[in-house]
Image (cartoon, rainbow, N blue to C red):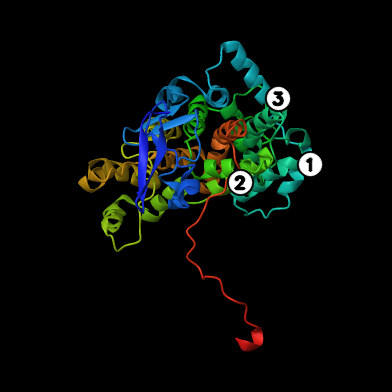
Amino acid sequence: MSNKKATLTLDGKTYEFDILDGSVGPSVIDIRSLYAKTGMFTYDPGFTSTAACDSTITYIDGDAGELLYRGYPIDQLAEDSHYLEVCYLLLYGELPSAKVLKDFELRVTNHTMIHEQMHNLYSGFRRDAHPMAIVCGVVGAMAAFYHDSTDVNDPIQREIASIRMIAKLPTIVSTAYKYSIGQPFVFPRNDLDYASNFLHMCFSVPTEDYKVDPVIARAMDKIFTLHADHEQNASTSTVRLSGSSDANPFACIAAGVACLWGPAHGGANEAALNMLKEIGTVDRIPEYVARAKDKSDPFRLMGFGHRVYKSYDPRAKVMQQSAKEVLELMGVENNPTLQVAKELEKIALEDPYFVERRLYPNVDFYSGIILEAIGFPTSMFTAIFALSRTVGWIAQWKEMIGDPQKKIGRPRQLYAGAVARDYIDIKNR
């Protein structure tokens, strides 16, 4: 707590509120006593100026373009670490020793299979169902299969549920993909790393051997790592709000999946690639850039700029290099959609309109390009995002459950409806 105080003057009366300092970043005014002291609430649509919790997991400096997981820069983790090590870091707060990491990886690997009866859930969906609809339903249904890990007050059950979700999400997501294309479900393999196992379950078939290219596996691992957590975004806040009622962990993560599905959130990479396909060819780019600059035109360039980052998205820098490696490997540099992406990227980095407004290509722009080059349809992009973000949701959920200040979420409102009035009998209306 800072020694500084914030003062608020209302109707000639002055009220004091503590100022709280974090380890880094903006300080906050503690207004928990505001209503008791003044009879008023704050008004903050979207909670863009409100800190709803304190957290030690992820820090973002949007102006500097900085993203830290437990203090470690995202570019260092993406380059030198791997996803399961990052999972451990997010869950437990420190980087593991070699022995501890091996044990953690073994625990995850031993939980990758899903209950055999869960396969029956998939047949209840139409073949053309969006993978996110399936993933949301199946994750929520985990509470019906794993009764021994739904008690949020039991730390052992919380731990088991956490490992299960990290382990089973690749299987759940890949099975949704296989179902959508009418291919047999593929079981996980214990001899493959996390990213390679996911690719194996998505692209292997019983009739021939499938070998995962290490470049593709590394690119997939980076996508997982870069999307693992992102502070108090919409889906993470949804998980925390759901968890504040002591709902079981599977229900909370399913709520996060549902929120992530929105095109303004996790669906942005799908929307970005669909935009590139709409543009179609390089010669049409000037037309769409002009439309983006026209305030009267509803068209917006997807995959550029970010709600938080006011400089280059640090994740996009890592993803940009990964995209080049994957495109070279796949030999798809001449793909029309990818040609449009490259030219659009060049314009955004040079055109004063975009530079002045800090509309740099973001992580959604590059991740969609990589995923399409690997062979995923756009409908799978958000499901892969959900798989990546699961560990972040779990880490945030566990932190909230263990917080002694935890309260059930209950935002207030500024009521603007009708005042009290008497009921009128239907005959007299």
- Cα distance in 3D space between marks 3 and 1: 18 Å
Q: Position of residue 130 (x, y in %)?
A: 59, 52
Residue 117 is marked as 1
Identify the mark at residue 255; answer none if there is no mark.
Answer: 2
Residue 256 vs residue 303, the one in the foreground:
256
Counting the numbered discs, the total is 3
Q: Gap in Å between the C-alphas at discs 3 and 2?
A: 26 Å
Asked if residue 366 is positioned above or below residue 102 in the image, the reply reads below
Verify CB contact (< 8 Å) between mark 3 and mark 2.
no
First of labels 3, 1 by sequence position: 3
Residue 334 picture location, percent across and down: 37, 41
User: Residue 97 is drawn in which quadrant?
Assistant: top right
Residue type indicated by callout 1: Gln
Q: Is residue 211 visible?
A: no
Q: Residues within 10 Å of mark 3 (few under 14, many from 20)?
A: some
**Residue behind mark 3:** 110
Which is more toward the observer, 9 or 188? 9
| Farthest-out residue, bottom | 427
Above or below, 153 against 127 in this view is above
User: Which residue is painted at 69% across and 32% down in the image?
Assistant: 161
What SS does tag 2 mark? helix
Left or right: 239 in relation to 299: right
Q: Point out the residue furthest to the left here.
A: 352
